Image: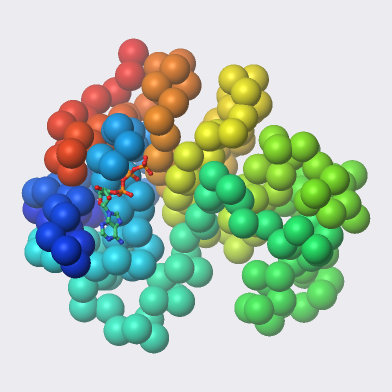
Amino acid sequence: MIQFEQVNKIYPGGRMALENVSFGLAPGEMAFLTGHSGAGKSTLLKLITAIERPTTGKVTIHGQDIAKMKRGDVPYLRRNIGIIFQDHNLLMDRSVYDNLALPLVIEGFKSSEISKRVEGALDMVGLGDKAAYAPIQLSGGEQQRVGIARAVINRPPLLLADEPTGNLDPKLSMDILRLFETLNASGTTVLIATHDLGLIARMRYRTLTLRQGRMVSEEVAL
Ligand SMILES: Nc1ncnc2c1ncn2[C@@H]1O[C@H](COP(=O)(O)OP(=O)(O)OP(=O)(O)O)[C@@H](O)[C@H]1O
């Protein structure tokens, strides 16, 4: 699903954000990506979504070499990746329903299919009764769950999360992780970038650790 082979990423200005990074994530896996601030986690996620390209080395996503991808192919790649951000980027002046429906409207789904999927996604995150609310009327944890529902509404095979529990208390963070486990159990490949070592310690998943741009360890938490 994801393959990095000896990847270096040097930003303009000379900053080496990733150095000789190699790892693979198989279809159906769930893993954490961790490391100090500035270790290169976001850069690694940006390479997976082709926001950035490797300086040297090879990044392959769904069998496609990112460096060889034409600009026009990038939207097709992204359609297969659900992305969850810490600040979830919801449209605050639209209802929860509209936030979820928008990606499907853009893809040209019929409105009956859209409402079916929106209802299904909201039920999955436990917000079936909040469709008509504006995100501003929801708590931080609920907003984060709307962000997750939006990311999976296209049923992408790959889900990336960048600090998805950053603003949440431990109980809500655990709820969000349980949600990722449910998605993973239904076949979605999941990669979660986080600083939250306490959370990682409580889960038995493979953990990829970056330190100053290098992949220093790959271990399964016990
Ligand atoms: N667009 C950019 N141009 C130049 N340097 C950058 C750019 N983006 C990131 N960097 C640098 O690359 C390094 C890795 O940054 P990155 O954002 O990947 O780290 P991170 O592990 O996600 O950090 P954090 O946890 O603080 O978000 C940092 O030194 C950062 O300053």
Q: Residue 51: x, y in percent?
A: 36, 67
> Where, quadrant-wise, is the N terminus in this rendering?
bottom left
Residue appearing at x 46%, y 45% in the figure: 162
Q: In this view, does 201 lie above or below 73?
A: above
Q: Nearer the viewer, residue 141 or 218?
A: 141
Whether residue 46 is visible here, answered yes or no, is yes
Furthest-front residue in this view: 13
Q: Nearer the viewer, residue 132 or 222?
A: 132
> Where, quadrant-wise, is the C terminus in this rendering?
top left
Residue appearing at x 19%, y 67% in the figure: 12
Residue 110 sits in which quadrant? bottom right
Q: Residue 189: x, y in percent?
A: 43, 47
Whether residue 31 is visible here, answered yes or no, is no
Residue 94 sits in which quadrant? bottom right
Q: Residue 220: x, y in percent?
A: 29, 23
Residue appearing at x 20%, y 51% in the figure: 17
How many numbered markers are drawn?
0
Question: With 8 as the anchor, is 117 left or right in this view?
Answer: right
Q: In this view, does 197 lie above or below 108?
A: above
Q: Which of 144 and 82 is in front in this view?
A: 144
Residue appearing at x 18%, y 43% in the figure: 213
Image colouring: rainbow
Q: Residue 210: x, y in percent?
A: 23, 36
Q: In this view, does 176 lie above or below 146?
A: above
Q: Which of 102 and 157 is in front in this view?
A: 102
Residue 215 sits in which quadrant? top left
